[in-house]
Image (tube, helix red, strand yellow):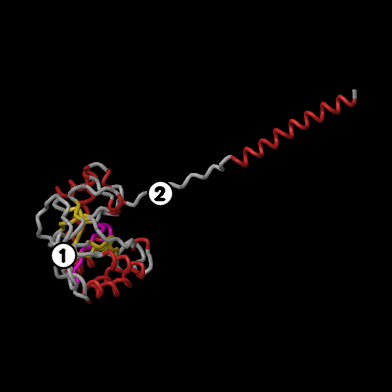
Amino acid sequence: MRRSLALRTAAILTVVLAVLLGGVYLIGRSPVPRAASPGVTPSATASPIPAGVQTTTGSAQVALTFNDGPDPTWTPLVLKALRQFHVKATFCLRGENVQAHPELVRAIVADGHTVCNHTWNEDFELGGRPRMDIEGDLLRTSQAIHAAAPHAPIKYFRQPGGNWTPQLVAIAQDLGMTSLHWAVDPQDWEEPSAADIISTVSKGTRAGSIVLFHDGGGDRRNTVSALATLLPDLVSRFQFEALPVDVPLTGQTRAPSPPVQQGGQP
């Protein structure tokens, strides 16, 4: 009797042990689930650009553009650098900064630069808002610019982040402004090193490029520092323009520009 009980117990233990070992084997063979990768938001500049958005100058000339100013620290330094190398640029102005620093708007205009509407307070989602809200934002910004510099033409509009929508482009055109994008972006809003800014712009600029910089919205010392090296390099290779304010609205993206030889000549 005892021997029979012992045999039965041993058999049960053997079965349990086999089940356990089998489970361990299967676990070892099964792939370990991987944690889901965090979502990556595509950059705004990778989004499709609607018809009617200008991405090049349409000529052999290069256009430097500056977003998010005017700023009392960085805008005067940018103006000084541009003045030193006789370069005219385009400044995309935030309405709230214009209202706070109207004297800087007058300095930009006095130096012969073009001004551009860049919304009131950098609303990245403006293109998805009701038409009345979009018109109100753009008109408020343009009115602030004209309060500072009454005779400055405002022929361009740049949406923060390049978050374009067909509705936004159409409304800007109805208000007499061409929607302005860019071709070269060193992403200086992320405050990369001056060397990185120089490398991206120097290698990426071609005839007809619109280059994006920032003279406001953060610490722009590296942008100012990069300009000291970039401007003499670019001036030796290209001609520059402040985007013209006397051209008719076409409602179409301009065609790529022809290549130029050394010194900016076609």
Compared with 154, 104 (above or below) is below
Which quarter of the picture shows residue 245?
bottom left
Badge 2 is on which residue?
40
Left or right placement of residue 11 versus residue 93 in this view = right
Left or right placement of residue 39 versus residue 26 in this view = left
Foreground: 255 or 123? 255
Helix, strand or loop status at disc 2: loop
Of the two numbered discs 1 and 2 on the same chain, state the one appearing first in sequence.
Answer: 2
Range shown magenta: 87-97
Is residue 86 found inside the magenta-colored segment of the image?
no
Compared with 28, 117 (above or below) is below
In the rendered structure, find residue 29 and report the number of the disc placed on it: none
Judged from this view, the residue extending furthest toward the bottom is 84
Compared with 126, 26 (above or below) is above
**How far from the left and from the top, in percent, is residue 171?**
18, 46
How many residues crowd mark 1 within 10 Å: few (<14), some (14–19), many (20+)? many
Residue at 56%, 43% (x, y): give it.
32
Badge 1 is on which residue?
60
Judged from this view, the residue extending furthest toward the top is 1
Amino acid type assigned to the residue bearing label 1 in the image: Ala
Amino acid type assigned to the residue bearing label 2 in the image: Val
How many residues crowd mark 2 within 10 Å: few (<14), some (14–19), many (20+)? few
Residue 17 seen in render: yes
Is residue 89 found inside the magenta-colored segment of the image?
yes
Which quarter of the picture shows residue 240?
bottom left
Residue 100 seen in render: no
Give the label, 1 or 2, closer to the camera.
1
Q: CA distance from mark 1 to mark 2?
A: 36 Å
Do residues under tags 1 and 2 come within 8 Å of each other at their CB atoms? no
Which quarter of the picture shows residue 14?
top right
Residue at 27%, 43% (x, y): give it.
129
